[in-house]
Image (cartoon, rainbow, N blue to C red):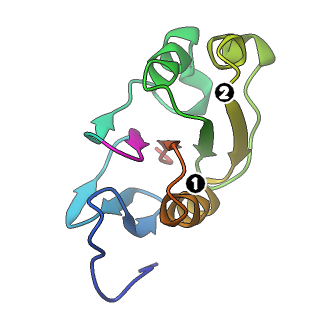
Amino acid sequence: MKFQADLPSRPNVVSAVHPDRIGVGSVVWRESLLLPWQGEVQAWAPAGFDGLRLEDFEAIAALQPELVLLGTGSRQRFPKPALLRPLMARRIGIETMNTAAACRTYNVLLSEDRAVVAALLLDA
């Protein structure tokens, strides 16, 4: 599903989302990724939802966002609360939704100049 006809001026805007890939600007990602409101987009380590570890959430917390959008693939799933400790300890909010919804929400929050990170999982 393509979100926009023209690429926006911000480099980290989601331009398209599919179950097996996400477009960020003109770059297509075919792996899970961390999409910060500023800075570099980066590959994210988990091997799908069931592979999430505490270290994965520590990597998100290190980016120092005010809010995290966790995209869990084609369906919404909730991680174990113990995995969220690095975010809770830093008082970083987290919302969990399917990846397409996380991408749409991320773009809206980005347009509002919010310090948001989308942690996006793709379906294997």
- Please tell me which residue lies in front, 3 or 31: 3
Q: Is residue 101 above or below residue 118?
A: below
Of circles 1 and 2, the one toward us is 2
Q: Secondary structure at mark 2?
A: loop
Question: Does 90 sit left or right of 51 as displayed?
Answer: right
The single residue placed furthest to the left in the displayed view is 26
Label 1 residue SS? helix
**Residue at x-position 57% and y-position 66%:** 108
Which residues are the magenta region? Answer: 33-38
In the image, 6 versus 65, the foreground residue is 65
Name the residue at 31% across, 50% down.
30
Query: Of label 1 and label 2, which has the lower sequence position?
Result: 2
According to the image, label 1 marks what residue?
99
Q: CA distance from mark 1 to mark 2?
A: 19 Å
Dot 2 corresponds to which residue? 92
Q: Could you tell me how many numbered marks the image carries?
A: 2
Q: Residues within 10 Å of mark 1 (few under 14, many from 20)?
A: many
